[in-house]
Amino acid sequence: MVYYIRFLKPPRIHREKARSLSISSLITVMTDLGDSFLAEDSDLVVSLIIEGSNKVLCQRTLNWKAGKRELPISLGPLPEQLSQYSFILCVSTASPYHGKLQLADYLLGNSGIPLVISGWSPPFGGPQLSVAEKLVERRFGLEEGVTLRIWEETGNSIARHIWDAALASVIYLHQAVSGSKIVTPQLLELLNNRHKPFNAIELGSGCGIVGIALAELLPQCSVLLTDLPEVEDIITRNTSTACLAPNSETQYQNLDWDEELPHDLCNTSIDLILISDCTYNADSSPALVSVLRQLTRKSPKAIILVALKRRHDSEAVFFDLMQSAGFGALDKDIVQLPSQYGEFDHIEMYCYVLERASLETTI
Ligand SMILES: C[S@@+](CC[C@H](N)C(=O)[O-])C[C@H]1O[C@@H](n2cnc3c(N)ncnc32)[C@H](O)[C@@H]1O
């Protein structure tokens, strides 16, 4: 599993007596679930950047030691004249500016992601804002010149975080679109040989990383992101800053699997349904599968892409329910993510469709 830099105390600017400034923050390096901390030593590069520029004002390397739960950051003293600027604090395992990949530290599509995912703070400083909002931004290069930028909350909300299966879904979709991975021919055809605009829906989209990545990768692609109302703010923040491919768009709509499907949910036929890390709670699986059944009643040829990191045996319920509901897996694949001590974690990817027998009863 990968580890994420989180700001336990958001970066703050202090005006010192000796006409100088200093910056402080408190970070941790933990899993998506927040259930364990990075248990190996790692050098972390802390960079203070002037907002809106690529200028690194100061940089320090700190050492995260195995067994730690948090790491204080302190930068300065800095000249008082800098108080007119807003800053961004980036904490990364490597300097954030290297090679041609300005602003993003790794190419997600090539699966070259590191064990520790960098964190970028919101802007702080300037005349008004001495402390940053409780958010952290992830920046992933999809390809050179295309950066996927996603905000997460720094707190413990399940919904308003990026989960490992979402990273795997983005890697998988990128590889499928670029042709660097052999995927099921139906998905390949859908993504790469389209003669019409493409419609996708994401269920339980959290911060929206998977659906937004798809709309950044594919032109003429319309993605409807859905989740519980608590994610609306963070998704709106992420969709409003996304750099979408030509003629692509994203929208958001609340969709609770336990409630009746809104009549106005999708007026056009859906080509692809995205689900990542939504099967961890076996109690939710019947409602989730029921939503899939209703969506495929209107769009019987839709492909359902399910990504999951298996956390416990009870998740098998989802697969049994999918089979009983008439869905068949076209393909099963694995995306590897780095894990501690040079090992790898396996994220399972499934492509489902309604099987012919069920299809015939649907039409
Ligand atoms: C572990 S998070 C995964 C988020 C995102 N897909 C990702 O992989 O980063 C599970 C998501 O399912 C959503 N969810 C859980 N129960 C739901 C329900 N009954 N209706 C709609 N969404 C639900 C949560 O709000 C959350 O965003």
Image: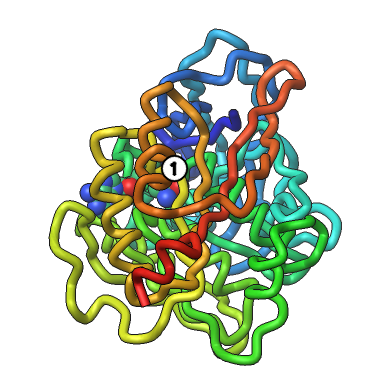
Q: Is residue 314 left or right of residue 88?
A: left
In the image, 136 versus 289, the foreground residue is 289
In the image, 309 versus 182, the foreground residue is 182
Picture coordinates of residue 146, whole percent (x, y): 68, 70
> Which amino acid type is shown beneath numbered disc 1?
Asp
Answer whether residue 79 is visible to the viewer in this image.
Answer: no
State whether label 1 is within 8 Å of ligand 1: yes
| Scheme of colours in the image | rainbow
Q: Residue at x 59, y 28 (%)?
A: 1
Q: Is residue 142 left or right of residue 236?
A: right
Residue wearing tag 1: 277
Asked if 324 appears above or below 259 in the picture, the reply is above
Q: Residue at x 64, y 66 (%)?
A: 187
Q: Residue at x 67, y 20 (%)?
A: 340
Q: Secondary structure at mark 1?
A: loop
Asked if 78 appears above or below 60 in the picture, the reply is below
- Dot 1 alpha-carbon crowd within 10 angstroms: few under 14, some 14 to 19, many 20 or more: many
Q: Residue at x 54, y 44 (%)?
A: 119
- So how many labels did they put on this image? 1
Quadrant location of the C terminus in the rendered image: bottom left
Picture coordinates of residue 263, whole percent (x, y): 18, 78
**Which residue extends farthest right?**
99
Answer whether residue 98 is visible to the viewer in this image.
Answer: yes
Q: Is residue 176 left or right of residue 197?
A: right
Answer with the quarter of the image where residue 295 lies.
Answer: bottom left
Answer with the quarter of the image where residue 173 lies.
Answer: bottom right
In the image, 163 versus 178, the foreground residue is 178
Q: Is residue 207 left or right of residue 192?
A: left
